[in-house]
Image (cartoon, helix red, strand yellow):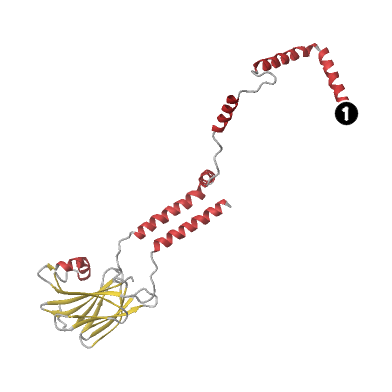
Amino acid sequence: MWWRRWKSKRAMLAADGLRERDPANDAEVQAFQRLSRLVRDAAPLGPGEVPPFDAVWAGVERRLREPRPEARTALAGLRAMLERRPVLVLAPVGAMILAAVLGVLWWTRPAVPSNQCFVDSYEVESGTVLIDQDPDQPERPTVIWHQVDSRGEG
Amino acid sequence: MGARRWFGRTAVCLLITGLLSAGPIEALADPVVLVRVTVIHAKKSPPFLHDRVKPLWDTLRKTFGDRFAYYDLVSSTEREVARQGRVVVPMPDGGTFAVEYRGVTADGRFLKLTVVHDDLTSRVRIHDQGLFFQAGKRWQGGVLIVGVQASSVSR
């Protein structure tokens, strides 16, 4: 392995030598040196100096205050599904609302007892029995007419 | 997978909503019932409506139409009875009107009653809180109308 590193180093030195001998690269080298100098001059810290703690902590706090990515809650999942496939959300929600409305209407409906009446049998010794009822109107009470006198007012 | 779970939860919610909307499930055992017997004297005229008959006015009008205009209350009796219990009401003509409670039908939908008035005995089935009339007996220029209503009593 050592000879590979040695060969690489020799190749790098040879390249540097070629670059130094090439006047076309001088401008690029000088531009890099200027940039490097600018960066070094811009850094307030000297070698071995410690950056100010408050400035570091202020940077940390600024990052902490940055909005976190939205947590994956049920509501977020619902929103995502609503955007991707709205039918899968709107149809069940609509069905639930409809069921709730129907349940409320059913629960709060006026109590109208059914007066449906079935006369299973009757026994009479005299007179006439007439069952007066309307199957189409279950709220209308049935009347069992028992008329002994044929001239009855009923 | 998520959609399937969502539909499952929705189905459970719908089921719960339906169960809540259905109301209490009534027991099929024979309940105690409150039997109310209302005896009314009805005539064609003059127009009159007894104060205690006013709650029944809509029902009377719907049932008898314009056959009568005069409704006077003769008596109103209500009593809680168990199965085979009887409510006997004296009639103004000297007779009696008896209602016997025979329990509920096998499917629990109807209350079974036997009504005895003079020589007429009839067996009927009515819904809980249902009402029916027996009429025709002539009395004082009018007709006696007897309303029978039975309501199960929650215990």
Decide: few, some or many residues near mark 1? Use Cα within 10 Å; few <14, some 14-19, many ≥20. few
Which residue is at the front of the view, A56 or A132?
A56
Which residue is at the front of the view, A86 or B36?
B36
In the image: residue A105, left or right of residue A66: left
Q: Quadrant of residue B118?
A: bottom left
Q: Seen from this angle, which residue lies furthest bottom?
A: A125
Q: Name the residue at 39% across, 61% down.
A: B21
Q: How many marks?
A: 1
The residue that mark 1 highlights is A4
Q: Name the residue at 14% across, 83% down.
A: B94
Q: Amino acid at mark 1?
A: Arg
Asked if one can make out residue A154 in the rendered structure from this viewpoint, the answer is: no
Q: Quadrant of residue B46?
A: bottom left
Where in the figure is residue A29, as x and y percent of width and height?
75, 14
Answer above or below: position of B64 versus B12. below
Where in the figure is residue B150, as x and y percent of width and height?
28, 74
Q: Quadrant where the C terminus of chain B lies?
A: bottom left
Which residue is at the front of the view, A38 or A11?
A38
Q: Quadrant of residue B138?
A: bottom left
In the image: residue A29, left or right of residue B123: right
Which residue is at the front of the view, A115 or B148?
B148
Where in the figure is residue B101, as x and y percent of width and height?
30, 79
Where in the figure is residue B131, as x and y percent of width and height?
26, 72
**Element assignment for label 1:** helix
In the image: residue B147, left or right of residue A111: left
Asked if one can make out residue B63 in the rendered structure from this viewpoint, the answer is: yes
In the image: residue B46, left or right of residue B5: left
What chain does badge 1 belong to? A
